[in-house]
Amino acid sequence: MASTEASPTVAEYSGQASSAKLVEISRYFLFIGIVGFGGPLVHIAMMEDDLVGEDSRGWTDESVFMEGLAICNMLPGPASTQLGIFMGWIRAGNLGALVAGFFFMLPTFILVCFFSWLYFAYQALPAVEAAFYGINPVVIGLIVGAAYSMAQSALADGRQHTEFEIGSETWSIDFLLLALLVAAIIATVTLNPNPVLVFIIAGLIAVVMYRSEWMRANRNRIVTAGVMTAIISAIYLLRGRALDIVGPRVRTAIEASPLWGVILVLWANPWVKLFLFMIYTGSFIYGGGLVLIPFIEKYVVNEFAWMTAREFVDGIAIGQLSPGPVVMTTAFVGYKLVLDISGGIVWMAIIGALVATIGAFGPSFVFITSLLPYFARIRENNIIQTVLTGVNAAVVGAILGATVTLAAESLVDIFTIILAVSTFGLFIRGTHAAYLILGGGGIGMAWYFLVL
């Protein structure tokens, strides 16, 4: 479907809210939030079967649904959740989008909070330690298995393809994209950079390599933009030295200004810091929920020290046991942070989980309710598509790079290595993640108490 026809249909149509429609939306998305085990593909298939066409609830037609799905796949954030928000918007406007998103995520939020309470209340027990001894390597295997599937798609998006067989699957690989993927792994492991910076560089490299004619035709604008970007980047990277160069008086004046003081006070508040960080993360987790991993590993684990790497892996496992998106692991992060700063008050920890969830999913609501017309117009832009081609490869590399660090905490002996490898093999063959996690917990407990 050409963008000139589809985009206005999606961009201009928004349903009108009514009490009956909002009740209908809440009931449906509460249902799908409870029974939607199996991940985004299951959620998307259920929405298409239940809501699209004359033989279903008839919220929209197939062309609008597919265009909305394509836009959601282009946006940062969990695609199936954003598609649910989109369908609520189609049915009952902005209020419908809010109701759809709220009830879609509610069951998962409750489950994650419940499992978080169990985990932090009883994690010191030998039985819990034994269970997560087996669960942690399973999570590593699941992450690598998901990245494997993502790589198969991402590496086939370029131009120069080399095809070969892996088992029963045909892989088509562009070696430039493979190089970007490997470079992202190496950079993440050795330098631990901001993931957004990695994505931007990968997108620019893809444009340079694939759109040379466009670059020649626009070289003056590109040079100007490049120089400005380089200057801004240099100032940011050398901001401490820059203040020293302009003089101690200027630096003192900046640090003594009321605005600077307000900024420092706000950033020092853990509630504000949690909320702002989750907004930032939710705005850039392009490519699916697993892109959360390099963000959390860099900031939450290493820089903010809100939790250990082992606790973060456990949080991913808890997120995988729920029917909702992996991004709901952010609720686990918020729960842990506020549990610590409140001295163990559970109801405050639940509020912390809520703050983290609102921050992480807030950008998705903004993208759908406010920016959808813009994204609908640019989706078919060739340059944007080329940028996303490079970003897709870098996303997989960043996930795998962050997983290397997490694996060092989880793969502690030959048993856990075998468990991770076995999980990878089973997962890419279609075994559900929840079954693997529960099985890993049981096997881990048996090995822990009978062998170790």
Image (cartoon, rainbow, N blue to C red):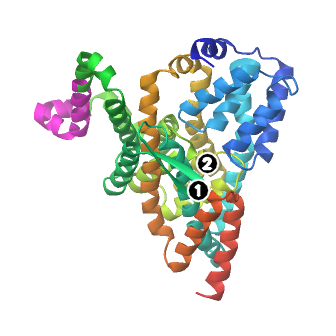
For mark 1, what is the residue?
A: 316
Identified at 34% across, 49% down, the residue is: 183
Query: In this image, 385 relative to 126: left or right?
Result: left
Identified at 20% across, 40% down, the residue is: 240
- Among the 4 quarters of the image, the one containing residue 426: bottom right
Residue 322 position within the rendered picture, expressed as x and y whole percent measured from the top left: 70, 52
Query: In this image, 144 relative to 80: left or right?
Result: left
Which range is magenta? 227-255
In the image shown, does 385 or 259 lie closer to the viewer? 385
Q: Secondary structure at mark 1?
A: helix
In the image shown, does 439 or 158 lie closer to the viewer? 158
Mark drawn on residue 123: none
For mark 2, what is the residue?
A: 326
Q: Mark 1 or 2 closer to N-term?
A: 1
Q: CA distance from mark 1 to mark 2?
A: 7 Å
Identified at 71% across, 37% down, the residue is: 44
Res. 394 in view: yes
Res. 96 in view: no
Identified at 52% across, 73% down, the residue is: 417
- Crowding around mark 1 (Cα neighbors within 10 Å: few <14, some 14 to 19, many 20+) is many
* Residue 231 drawn in magenta: yes
Residue 347 position within the rendered picture, expressed as x and y whole percent measured from the top left: 67, 50
